[in-house]
Image (cartoon, rainbow, N blue to C red):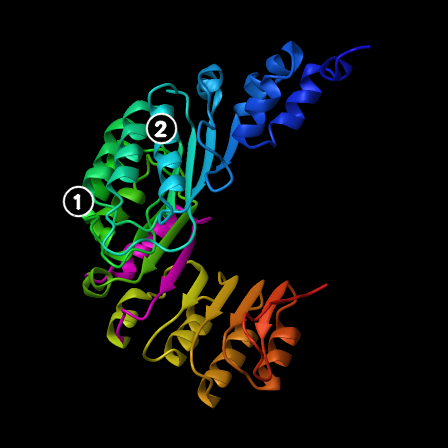
Amino acid sequence: MAHPGEQLPEEVLALIFRHLPLRDRAAAARVCRAWAAAATCSAVWHDTIVSCDCEGEGMLPPYLSSCLDYVHNLWLEFEPSRERSRRLATQLLTALAGRTPGLRGLHLECRGEKPLFDAGRDVLDAVHAICRAAPALRHLDLRRLPFTLDDALVLQVARGCPELRSLFLNNSTLVGSVGPGSVLELLEACPRLCTLGLHLASLSHPALDVLAAPHRAPLELLALRCACPEDARAPPLPNEAWASLRHRHPGLIVEVELEPALSDESVTRVLQPAMPVAALSLCLSGDTVGPVRFAALHYAATLCVLEVRAAASAELDAALELLAARCSGLREVHCFCVVRPSVLHAFRAHCPRLRSYTLKLKREPHPWRPTLVE
């Protein structure tokens, strides 16, 4: 009788094994020679997703460590408040930094709550090591990393990753420690960078000028988060600079998140008419009606997604109806307060591309689920 692994070609086994967690890949490699060959081939490891909450100690035994050379894109999930999950994550990142100069993409996803007063030095040191050892890195996503990112990390990326295409630093930290100077150096060192996520305080007028330079690759996405005191105090970026950037990159998409740290005055400085805002998230402690009206007047040609968290009011309902009438390209609208029926009717009537909405006419238990448009 043939062994189970010999009943399927290696390429079919590889397609199966690529969906297994590391511990199951290790178990498969011990079944027989055919399974070991399939479990250790490059196709299994090219795109690897690891959840450290599901893995056990010794998730990467020595006979599989060489497979790290095949990892091109790694999505790593861990829970920083759980010591074992965090240790496994840092061990894997450190091992990866020691073996794979061919890494192309790294996405870190933190689950659960971050321990209080935790700077995340162990995790950030491992990210530093990755950036030093992976000159071919093209995509680095730290949006879901709850630790304060700083200039040293950005400068390490600038020095070590010249092929970078996308970088997301717009995480949920309450302290903005990435200065505009380090971002400017990053842009000059990485001319192919076409997707960038930042806190507002990290962006500057000179950086917009560099992004608008004729020699740069087309800028596709600029995601801005405004959530910490440094963002509220950031100097305004002039409308003329946004107009030049939009003219240089006509396909540019700008995503803006405005959080409670911003005063009404700060919001008026952030939102500029020439910004090609495609996604706008408003979670403000002050006026929300004004920004919604501003978006209706200036972002009618670009706005695709709107999220609003505010107290219900007749004024907000009127602003939403105005936005619905002007922004016919909207695909999603999510308002986390009760609205009057005419608001729902306005979006259904004027937005033919609408695919998902959260527009509740009465209070419901949370979480509120969006309605999908058939």
| Left or right: where 276 falls relative to 27 | left
Q: Front-most of 164 and 24?
A: 24
Q: Is residue 194 visible?
A: no
Quadrant where the image shows the C terminus: bottom right
Q: Position of residue 324 (x, y in %)?
A: 55, 74
Q: Quadrant of the N terminus?
A: top right
Q: Which residues are magenta?
A: 235-263
Front-most of residues 67 and 256? 67
Question: Residue 135 vs residue 55: left or right?
Answer: left
Residue 188: give x, y in percent of width and height.
24, 35
How dense is the environment of label 2, judged by Cα within 10 Å: few (below 14), some, or many (20 and up)? some
User: Relative to the observer, which residue lies in front, 113 or 57?
Assistant: 57
Above or below — where is 158 with respect to 332?
A: above
Is 318 magenta? The answer is no
**Residue 10 numbered tag:** none
* Disc marking residue 163: 2
The location of residue 27, given as percent across then percent down, is 58, 23
Secondary structure beneath label 2: loop
Question: Does residue 11 show up?
Answer: yes
158 relative to 317, above or below = above
Q: Quadrant of residue 217?
A: top left
| Above or below: residue 238 compared with residue 363 | above
Q: Which residue is mark 1?
A: 181
Q: Position of residue 236 (x, y in %)?
A: 22, 62
Q: Amino acid at mark 1?
A: Gly
Q: Are marks 1 and 2 in contact (CB under 8 Å)?
A: no
Q: Is residue 144 left or right of residue 56?
A: left
Q: Secondary structure at mark 1?
A: helix
* Residue located 23% across and 54% down the image: 117
What amino acid is labelled 2 in the image? Answer: Glu
Q: Was residue 245 drawn as part of the magenta stretch in this picture?
A: yes
